[in-house]
Image (spheres, rainbow, N blue to C red):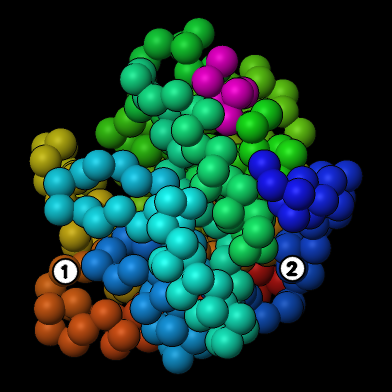
Amino acid sequence: MNDFTRNESAARTPTTRAAQRAVKQAPGARPEFSLAHLTVMGCPPPEMIYIAARAGYDYVSVRTIFMGLPGEPNYGLARNPDLYAKTKRALDTTGVRLHDIELARVKEGIDPKTYVPEFEIAARLGARAVLSSIWTSDRAFYLDTFAAICDLARPFGLTVDLEPVPIAGVHDLAGAVEVLRAVQRPNAGLMVDTHHFHRARDNPAELAALPREWFHFAQICDASAEIPTDREEMIHVMREARLYVGEGGIDIASILHAMPRIPYSIELPHLEHVHETGYAEHAFRCLETARAYLAEHEETFAS
């Protein structure tokens, strides 16, 4: 950690909870939106930021932790000074803010300490959160590793928000809640994706009973009401064919009503739309439809 980041981290750490409170929005406030990596998967962070700015997003959610997936570029900033400089310039010139980075996976063979350089860069760029998910069934291992990720992120003022994913080791709300209660880290949180929540057959009423301080942001999109039983079809929809908010069968309003008003990261990959219209138009339609849906259900979010 260099002197610049050490000083910045020292200033941020005692106010982590204050920062978390600040990002939560009062009832009736204009919803804030972030453009998520998967929505514009082929765009490097600077291009993503400029697209977000033109469309009217408040934030971006960037995948700076390389996952090594087939065909997926490495957008890590810690070891790419040129990409970092361009990303910072894009944030500075547009006013779009970096909300969170991804994906700090809990998985055998991955040392969580390797995430620290990206945590440092994310904090320098003003990020608030790190998205995490668990890809193993070894409970002792994933509890220790998730706790370690939280501890590594905390000096940078970052929350670590656990996302249950239907095809992962921790695949539903109950599993994620069990992890958070077990690790008891002050910067640990829960990240609900409306697609995954529906696919896991989770109940919004259970969200309403959880501690409000666990919620820092959510991911939104739509999909068919019918839940695929084939794993490959599930993966296809997750990565390539989600629907605009309000165009599918997920009861998004009930899910969001059960949580505080927080920023909504639109994670909505749809390759056919992108091939037809391009990334910029797709990102705009994602935001346009989400805003229309929330406006239509405004009374749902008034409490």
Do we see residue 64 in this rendering? no
As drawn, is 234 to the left or to the right of 216?
Answer: left
Q: Quadrant of residue 200?
A: top left
- For the residues labelled 1 and 2, the Cα–Cα distance comes to 32 Å
In-front residue for pair 269/298: 269
Q: Residue at x 62, y 63 (%)?
A: 125
Q: Residue at x 42, y 75 (%)?
A: 46
Q: Is residue 113 above or below residue 204?
A: above
Kind of element beneath mark 2: loop
Extreme residue in the bottom direction: 54
Quadrant location, the C terminus:
bottom right
Please state the extent of the stretch shown in magenta in the rendering: 144-149
Name the residue that disc number 2 marks: 25
Quadrant location, the N terminus:
top right
Q: Position of residue 249 (x, y in %)?
A: 31, 62
Q: Are marks 1 and 2 in contact (CB under 8 Å)?
A: no
As drawn, is 231 to the left or to the right of 128?
Answer: left
Q: Residue at x 67, y 29 (%)?
A: 151
Q: Residue at x 58, y 54 (%)?
A: 121
In-front residue for pair 296/94: 94
User: Disc 2 marks which amino acid?
Assistant: Gln
User: Disc 1 marks which amino acid?
Assistant: Leu
Q: Position of residue 203 (x, y in %)?
A: 49, 41
As drawn, is 40 to the left or to the right of 1?
Answer: left
Q: Residues within 10 Å of mark 1 (few under 14, many from 20)?
A: some
As drawn, is 14 to the left or to the right of 168?
Answer: right
In-front residue for pair 203/137: 137
Q: Residues within 10 Å of mark 2 (few under 14, many from 20)?
A: some
Examine the structure image and report whether residue 197 is included in the region drawn in magenta. no
Name the residue that disc number 1 marks: 271
Q: Position of residue 21 (x, y in %)?
A: 80, 57
Do we see residue 280 in this rendering? yes
